[in-house]
């Protein structure tokens, strides 16, 4: 942003090499030294002096930092005031955009209801595919056209009619239960499996019953023959 610029670049001067040399000298002096009672006090004094120098150096670094940052801190306070000024128009425009978007969505939902009522007027299909069951949030998008919504609703309607016809054509005792299941999940494959499993189990039960009756009849005949004998 052209309104913000730095007029002069400052610099901080510090004789780092001299300080490093001084510390390295002390390290070299005491690194291999074996302390005695005579040299111990001198070593302690040196450590105390080095610690004092270290603290003085650190304190000065902090002072320089505060001094260096002072113009930026002053700049930042004023800059923050400007930054906060942006919030009012942003919020105002944002509220208007939100209100407009809310109105647009409400209008789109009304359009979706009208499309559904036009394409799915049958009461029986209303019960199978009520709008809230097939509603797709993407229909509310501004980029999703009425033509696309109509195509989606028609697809649900055609699938539902096919499913109902298929379930009824199976002529099962469980037709009503299968239709209820379809209303719950809109899954024709699951409904077909439900009826198929029921019919298979039904055949197995009937077969077992026939076998039982047959065995009872045969046993009765054998008993009558034994009675005659």
Image (cartoon, rainbow, N blue to C red):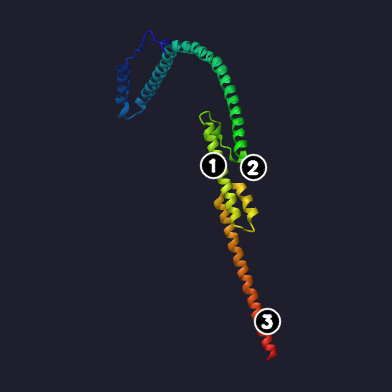
**Is 215 placed left or right of 48 in the picture?**
right
Of residues 98 and 104, the one drawn nearer to the viewer in this rendering: 104
Query: What residue is drawn where x is 67% and y is 88%?
Result: 226
| Figure disc tally | 3
**Distance of label 3 from label 1 (alpha carbons):** 61 Å
Indicate which label's residue lies in the foreground, 2 or 1.
2
Image quarter in which the N terminus is found: top left
Q: Which of pointers 3 and 2 lies earlier in the amino acid sequence?
A: 2
9 vs 147: above or below: above
Asked whether the viewer can see residue 186, the reply is no
Q: Secondary structure at mark 3?
A: helix
The part of the image, by quadrant, that contains residue 8 is: top left
Q: Which residue is mark 2?
A: 122
Query: What residue is drawn where x is 52% and y is 12%?
Result: 81
Query: What residue is drawn where x is 56% and y is 48%?
Result: 162
- Residue lying furthest right: 227
Query: What residue is drawn where x is 41% and y is 16%?
Result: 61
**Distance of label 3 from label 2 (alpha carbons):** 58 Å
Indicate which label's residue lies in the foreground, 3 or 1.
1
Q: Which residue is mark 1?
A: 155
Q: Which residue is mark 3?
A: 220
Q: Secondary structure at mark 2?
A: loop
Q: Which of pointers 2 and 1 lies earlier in the amino acid sequence?
A: 2
**Is 73 placed left or right of 195 in the picture?**
left
Of residues 94 and 199, the one drawn nearer to the viewer in this rendering: 199
């Amino acid at each position: 942003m052209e309104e913000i610029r730095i007029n002069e670049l400052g610099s901080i001067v510090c004789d780092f090499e001299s300080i490093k040399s001084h510390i390295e000298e002390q390290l070299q002096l005491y690194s291999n030294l074996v302390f005695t009672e005579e040299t111990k006090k001198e070593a302690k004094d040196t450590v105390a002096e080095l610690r004092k120098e270290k603290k003085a150096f650190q304190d000065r670094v902090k002072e320089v930092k505060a001094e260096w940052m002072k113009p930026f801190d002053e700049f930042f306070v004023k800059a923050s005031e400007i930054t906060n000024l942006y919030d009012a128009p942003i919020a105002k425009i944002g509220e208007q955009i939100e209100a407009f978007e809310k109105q647009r969505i409400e209008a789109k939902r009304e359009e979706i209801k009208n499309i559904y009522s036009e394409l799915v007027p049958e009461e029986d299909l209303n019960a199978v595919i009520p709008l809230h069951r097939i509603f797709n949030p993407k229909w509310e998008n501004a980029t999703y056209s009425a033509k696309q919504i109509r195509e989606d609703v028609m697809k649900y309607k055609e699938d539902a009619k096919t499913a109902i016809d298929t379930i009824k054509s199976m002529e099962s005792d469980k037709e009503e239960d299968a239709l209820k299941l379809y209303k719950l999940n809109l899954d024709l494959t699951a409904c077909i499996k439900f009826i198929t499993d029921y019919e298979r189990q039904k055949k197995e039960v009937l077969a077992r019953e026939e076998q039982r009756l047959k065995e009872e009849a045969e046993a009765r005949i054998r008993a009558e023959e034994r009675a005659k004998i």
